[in-house]
Amino acid sequence: MNFHAKSLNNSVNSNLRLSRVTEIDKHLHLGRFASFCAGIGGGNLQNMDNRFTSHQSSQFFRVKLGLVLHLPQAYSSSNWSPKKLNPYFKVSYNIDRFDETYRAIEGRYTVSSVRMGLGAIIKVNHYIGVLFESSHNQCLSSDFRTYFQNNVGIIVNMDQILLKR
């Protein structure tokens, strides 16, 4: 039996995938345990798989929507989480639009995916935190590519800066 041979073929997967992404997200708090997030971003994807040559890259633009579940917090527009460590579970839907380099290799410009992961924000001060996230990313296309990604970043609470009194 052959369920979906292309999706089971692991020959093009790589652990050398590296991307640099800048994203702007807005979180709308649905209560003490959940937030809806929407965002846009852009970046540079390198070494997607073994069909890319060394240091070959592709630019992309991203739109995303998601749901973040977190421990109970006392969020408000004037009070970011009072806790130093803020763990969360996140589910998001991403649509990425790539450039010609990616299309020439992969055969399409647009990729959509569902990302599920666990992460934590370590608050440095009232405005800045460090983000650590590990997630499972499932592409929604004919080849059903699956990969894990680890993110490390800096998070800036713009609401705190823009609404500063």
Image (cartoon, rainbow, N blue to C red):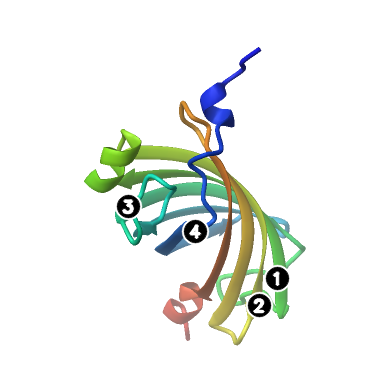
Q: Amino acid at mark 3?
A: Phe
Q: Position of residue 124 (x, y in %)?
A: 61, 85
Q: Name the residue carrying label 2.
A: 122
The residue tagged 1 is 86
Amino acid type, mark 4: Leu
- Separation of disc 3 and disc 1 at Cα? 29 Å
Which residue matches tag 3? 60
Q: Nearer the viewer, residue 113 or 49?
A: 49
Q: Earlier in the sequence, mark 2 or mark 1?
A: 1
Tag 2–tag 1 contact (CB < 8 Å) = yes
164 sits to left or right of 148 = left
Give the crowd class for mark 4: few <14, some 14-19, many >=20 residues within 10 Å. Answer: few
* Residue 29, picture quadrant: bottom right
C-alpha distance separating marks 2 and 1: 6 Å
Which amino acid is tagged 2?
A: Ile
Query: Which one is closest to the eye, mark 4 or mark 3?
Result: 4
Of labels 3 and 1, the one closer to you:
3
- Which badge, 4 or 3, is on the more N-terminal residue? 4
Badge 2 or badge 4: first in the primary sequence: 4
